[in-house]
Image (cartoon, rainbow, N blue to C red):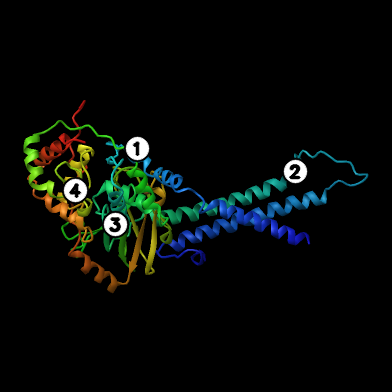
Amino acid sequence: MLDHLIASAASFSGDVDGLFVLITVLVGVWFIAAEAMFFWLIFRFRAKDGEKAQYVTGKEKHLKKWINIPHALVLVCDVVIIVAAIRVWVTIKQTLPPADRTVRVVAQQWAWTFADPGPDQKLDTPDDIRTTDELHVEVGKTYHFLLESKDVVHSFFVPAFRLKQDADPGRIYTGWFKPTKTGSYDILCAEICGIGHGVMGALLVVDTPEAFQAWEQAHAAETPAEAASATESTPAPAAGQ
Amino acid sequence: MLNKAYAALIGAALSAAFVAGCGTQPAAERSSQLYETCMPCHGSSGEGNLALRAPAIAGLPKWYVLAQLEKFKKGVRGAHPDDMEGHRMRPMARSLLGPNDPELVADHVSKMRAVWEKPDFAMADTSAGGTTYRGLCVTCHGEGGEGNEALGAPPITRQHDWYMVAQLRKFQSGMRGSNPDDITGAQMRAMSLTLADSVAMHDVVSYVKTLPH
Ligand SMILES: [Cu+2]
């Protein structure tokens, strides 16, 4: 339903949309009912000539039921929403279906870099394909991602997957997704992380198996090797100089 | 009648807003406004910031600043997955969206008063560094470290020593200068590879800090 507004490209993105629709409908029905009642009361009991206004405490049983019954019904709706939300949460965040492939996602001020395991399917080996600004995945495969931040708090946000995961520096977050539709989708940072936060974007490209193979072959050879970090190996300046 | 007057009024307001919003801003005002993007890291007078590993940029020639902004913008510089500082600079260069923005901000930077940055490292062997400098660096950066526009080599005498050492390391590891479109970077990378070790880097950078500025 919401995929008319924004592409829905992961196995669980429909579940999140379903939740949105459920909440909108349940809350919307009560919103309209409450507003209709409100305006009807204003109209029905408007000032009239020769009729004195009366003060109603609402303590009597026959009046109180107008509060108690909707209250109980709203609570039932609440329970429905909570149950549905927890089910989706468990699907996305609490379960980890076995992976066909594992990629690394690294956030830093203000870019996304990625590591694909390359032909040997193992991360942290020389044939890893390391990229900046672009993550390639194969449609229909289940991916695990290992998310980390090099500096401050960032958040890995893929709107088309309905996926969002914060990344605190010092931790590795494991999550999963299964792309279901080919195309190029935005990756955004969803946690204010400094002056470049607004332009911290990248692309998630969901390829057909053939396109993915071609991409892998093209990049396996020319991937930038892990360079010794210039920052870490820079000695601290001599004190007092 | 009233409707027509109303429409005319709205039209006038909109066109006034449009005129006010674009085109009329003086270039100098625009360029100092653009520099506000650079200020958090490079400082209000372009002095650089060790904590953020941002170099001193005040007084760098316009052609050099412009060339580097273009490289960052295209991902020719700063896009290596391990280049932390490059990743901070790249989106900033990309955020200069107007066609004249890079030029305006480069002009602004070039007109800032350059200050000689005192060494942060203890001075190393400047005579060994001098020998290296006269053997390698002098061809492009000049005898006095004044740079050479024709060769795309920036002036270096006023740069922070820690920044120069960090860049030498980046050139050596291929974090900088290994992109096929980075011609001048590749030249510098080849030179950096002739430096044997970090001692040689510190020596030559210390020598640069002794050059008149
Ligand atoms: Cu971020």
Mark 4 = which residue?
A: B170
Q: Residue furthest toward the top?
A: A240
Q: Amino acid at mark 3?
A: Gly
Residue A211 image offset from top left, x and y in percent? 29, 72
Mark 2 = which residue?
A: A61
- Position of the N terminus of chain B by quadrant: bottom right
Mark 1 = which residue?
A: B43
Q: Are marks 2 and 1 on the same chain?
A: no
Residue labelled 3 has its Cβ within 8 Å of some atom of ligand 1: no
Mark 3 = which residue?
A: B75
Residue B177 image offset from top left, x and y in percent? 20, 54
Q: Are marks 2 and 4 in contact (CB under 8 Å)?
A: no
Q: Are marks 1 and 3 on the same chain?
A: yes
Residue B88 image offset from top left, x and y in percent? 32, 47
Q: As drawn, is B124 to the left or to the right of B71? A: left
Q: Is residue B29 visible?
A: yes
Q: Earlier in the sequence, mark 1 or mark 4?
A: 1
Residue drawn at x 74%, y 58% as measured from the top left: B5
Q: Chain of mark 1?
A: B
Q: Are marks 4 and 3 on the same chain?
A: yes
Residue drawn at x 54%, y 52% as measured from the top left: B21
From the image, state whether disc 2 or disc 4 is nearer to you. 4
Q: Are marks 1 and 4 on the same chain?
A: yes
